[in-house]
Image: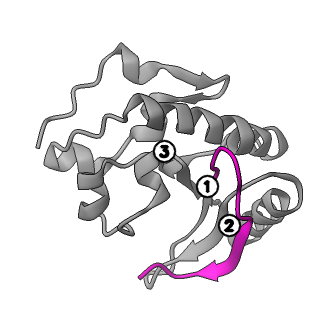
Amino acid sequence: MKTHNPTNGDRLRLTPHFTLEEMTRSATARRYHVDNTPSPEAVHNLRRLCTKVLEPLRKEFGPIRVTSGYRSEWLNRMVGGATHSQHIFGEACDIHIPSRAKGIEMLEFIFMTLDYDQLLFEHNLQGAEWIHVSYREGHNRQIMIPYYMPA
């Protein structure tokens, strides 16, 4: 494992309101010194995700806090992500929701107005809830699961 050393490249602005640093930030990566540097292709995918989903969502609801964006394969294994998670390719992110009601509004907005590949209102056994959304260049499958618990 390599230590992730933040550089000016991490501050790269992907879109007017989202940076590469916030789309790759991970407390687990910091804690365990995991390199979470995305490939150029993953950076391209993150830019598309921010442009097509996060910027319109921010315009509608104000500032958006991404809790998990890009994950290296190693980091994805460490956090128990799916083997072929779209996070690995820079195609997915998890979004903090301030309340269930606001989360449902955000979910409905994405579902009704934006192009997406997967849209999940996720929760865990501890009661935390968040929105997982992904975007792929080309064909998006438009899969929406309104209340999903990851394995």
Mark 3 lies on residue: 90
Neighbour class for label 1 at 10 Å: few (<14), some, many (≥20)? many
Cα–Cα span, label 1 and label 3: 9 Å
Q: Which colour scheme is used?
A: one colour
Chain-order first, disc 1 or disc 3: 3
Image x and y of residue 74, in percent: 23, 54
Lower sequence index among marks 1 and 2:
2
Q: Name the residue under label 1.
A: 134
- Residue at the far front: name it: 138
Task: Report x, y in % for residue 91.
Answer: 54, 48
Q: Is mark 2 on a helix, strand or loop?
A: loop
The verdict on residue 102 being magenta is no
- What quarter of the picture does the C terminus occupy? bottom left
* x, y percent for residue 121: 64, 72
Say which amino acid is labelled 3.
Answer: Gly
Q: Residue at x 79, y 41 (%)?
A: 56
Q: Is mark 1 on a helix, strand or loop?
A: strand
Q: Residue 78 carries which label?
A: none
The stretch drawn in magenta includes residue 140 = yes
User: Closer to the observer: label 2 or label 3?
Assistant: 3
- Say above or below: 42 vs 40: below
Check disc 1 and give the amino acid type. Ser
Q: Residue furthest right?
A: 112
Secondary structure mostly taken by the magenta-highlighted segment of the chain: loop
Give the vertical position of 16 relative to 109 (above or below).
Answer: above
Which residue is the extreme one toward the top?
8
Q: Mark 2 points at which residue?
A: 99
Q: Give the range drawn in magenta.
A: 134-151
Of badges 1 and 2, nearer the viewer stands 1
Indicate the amino acid at tag 2: Ser
Q: Which residue shows up at 55% across the image and 21% down it?
A: 13
Write the residue at 81% across / 63% down. 111
